[in-house]
Amino acid sequence: MTTIAHTPPPHTPPPHTLPPHPPSPLSLAAGTTQRARELTEPLLREAVALLEPWTAVMSSYHLGWCRADGSPVEHASGKAVRPALAVLAAEAVGAPAEAALPGAAAAELIHNFSLIHDDIMDGDEERRRRPTVWKEFGVSGAILAGDALQVLAFDLLLAKGGPHGPAAAGHLAVALRELVEGQACDIQFSARPWSGPGTVTVAEYQAMAMAKTGALLAGASAMGAVLGGADQPLVHALAEAAGQLGLAFQCVDDILGIWGDPAVTGKPVRGDLRERKKSLPVVAASAASGSVARRLAELLADGRSPAGEEEAEKVLLEAAELIEECGGRRACEREAEQALARARASLDLVPMPAGVRAQYTALADSFVARVM
Amino acid sequence: MTTIAHTPPPHTPPPHTLPPHPPSPLSLAAGTTQRARELTEPLLREAVALLEPWTAVMSSYHLGWCRADGSPVEHASGKAVRPALAVLAAEAVGAPAEAALPGAAAAELIHNFSLIHDDIMDGDEERRRRPTVWKEFGVSGAILAGDALQVLAFDLLLAKGGPHGPAAAGHLAVALRELVEGQACDIQFSARPWSGPGTVTVAEYQAMAMAKTGALLAGASAMGAVLGGADQPLVHALAEAAGQLGLAFQCVDDILGIWGDPAVTGKPVRGDLRERKKSLPVVAASAASGSVARRLAELLADGRSPAGEEEAEKVLLEAAELIEECGGRRACEREAEQALARARASLDLVPMPAGVRAQYTALADSFVARVM
């Protein structure tokens, strides 16, 4: 019996050969993030295991590894986009995926630190269809869990990054500073008016999105390239490409936040309008002039709660239509396309194996395939 | 007139000569922390200036450099104990004070990050006789300001630490992990019972205090020594000494938290008892047996608010007396003395210039001089 189990069946292809037909771009992208997640997760688990039990449980809960009582779950984690970019950057410059892993894990730790803290600041009660950390463990616990993940990122990179670890940690520190800055800008946007002087401009929005979403994707790529031994120009081109992908990603997220299908996004329909978020479609629409734009600003600025649930939905629906009429959706789509084009242009500067380039292209396409 | 102001009076000694009589240990210690603060502050200001305006104002407000509206104040900052330990460690191993400054500034940034976040977690509304950051700017702002200071610490160390910067950053990451762990333990202590199974033990308290207070003092010393080019055994001895000083410091703080004079401490009398903090005098007293200890546990566990302010004060006064009767205060003083002795023993292992040793001794004595 055991001999049979150890003998491969006659038609099983040897591992790591290419499949007979080229995979579709979307399944190629999914394969890339899946591979990055599997490669990175052991380091993440090892890092989280260093924490004292309470912080470890909160972090593991957030990462989808356990329930609130600490019992393990068969998990389907997040998308591992940052580890994928770190791994691809290392492979693009001719290093093995393994070289990038401390950077991949550090970027994922920082990403999750920011999710945990942002959920407190934004008052979000659900993430991935479960209560957020602050909702489950209290605000103090969530502050601590976030702090702990931030520390682990630097700890891991400096302890396991090898000779290029410190340079990678330098890139991480810069990305993290921008990330915090982006969140600070985003929070301050909420206090700004919907029209007239002080309205958030498209340029301000772009700067915020580049900092809040682009910086860590750029940092993950820079770390992967640096850990792979790349020189400054290559590091820069790969980081720039990833930063632009981040901007495209944020634009798509903003479109889904208003017009996304709740069954697909897992978020309520028109959720960003309900929360009066100054996302790009709204910001771009607010820059328009004329009676439609004025009506939109009135609608969004109106602090009164409509009579009932049904009335509230009607207001949100009208706002969504006005945003489209003012060109807010189209402007956001165009911004995503342009950011994607800039990302591709940066990638074109980097000589890399064809297989790696195909994965980059597929990943970039998957970022915007959700809406276009 | 102006010529007189610009001409030194005939008997003014030239700058930097020794005073005619050796200074008292306390004024020597004050001079050491003052010098470290003055050397470190330019780096701190340069780092904070990197932040976007809102985060920069919150951080500067916390650091005592400005009012909540951003207008500058003539400030009297905190004690700069961590910068002093970093500077002394560098000088102990024969390096100039300047070598330690990136480590000194990083330790101070981390210290202030932890104060800002701890004030949220503990619900503390005042610090240094002003509203805390969360009280003044809201919880979201305070989370962000803390996060920003944490980032700046690594950013500064990696960007300005020179060839030993990465090694110093490694020490900082370890210290920071312990700091977060210590805070996690401290928070969890509050949910533990006052007597019977699950009561916090003296050993658990020591571990918490070493992590929460000792680790960053040890980290500051390790960074100073590493940046000064010291080898591992010296780094270790200096860090160990500073960690023990941290434990002594915490014990003294705990004594002041119950028996301190509000006019000196700036904190309410018996404040730690009012907040039902499981500080060392209480933990040590709870370990005693007999009727006095039972009465103390009853008093502390009683969740009912006494009838009025006067009644509440009577309860706190009785609890303070019972703690003393059970030997809680004496145990805490002994713990501080022992930690101080361990610190001195570690320092004795390190050959260093006599002037540096005198400053170390004075600083150590100043830690406990507040109560003994």
Image (cartoon, coloured by chain):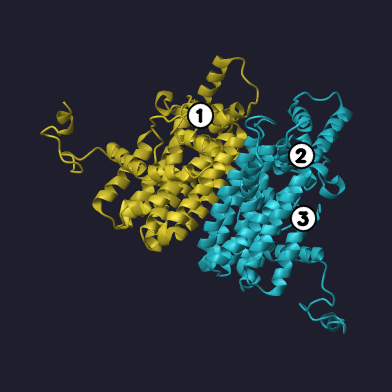
Chain colours: A cyan, B yellow
Residue denoted by label 3: A368
Amino acid type indicated by mark 3: Val
Identity of the residue furthest to the left in this view: B10
Q: Give how far across and how far down residue A15 sits, in percent.
A: 78, 78
Residue B186 visible from this viewpoint: yes
Q: Secondary structure at mark 1?
A: loop
Residue A49 visible from this viewpoint: no
- Give the Cα separation between the discs numbered 3 and 2: 19 Å
Q: Is residue B330 left or right of residue A38?
A: left
Q: Nearer the viewer, mark 2 or mark 1?
A: 2
Q: Is residue A315 left or right of residue B293?
A: right
Q: Residues within 10 Å of mark 2 (few under 14, many from 20)?
A: many
Q: Secondary structure at mark 2?
A: helix
| Number of marks drawn | 3
Q: Give how far across and how far down residue A303 sits, in percent.
A: 75, 25
- Chain letter, disc 1 residue: B
Q: Residues within 10 Å of mark 3 (few under 14, many from 20)?
A: many
Name the quadrant containing residue A223.
bottom right
Please tell me which residue lies in front, A193 or B121: A193
- Give the Cα separation between the discs numbered 3 and 1: 43 Å
Identity of the residue furthest to the right in this view: A310
On the same chain, marks 2 and 1? The answer is no
Q: Give how far across and how far down residue A173 sits, in percent.
A: 54, 53
Amino acid type indicated by mark 1: Ala
Q: Nearer the viewer, mark 3 or mark 1?
A: 3
User: What label does residue B68 carry, if any?
Assistant: 1
Residue denoted by label 2: A272
Q: Residue at x 39, y 41 (%)?
A: B80
Q: Are marks 2 and 1 in contact (CB under 8 Å)?
A: no
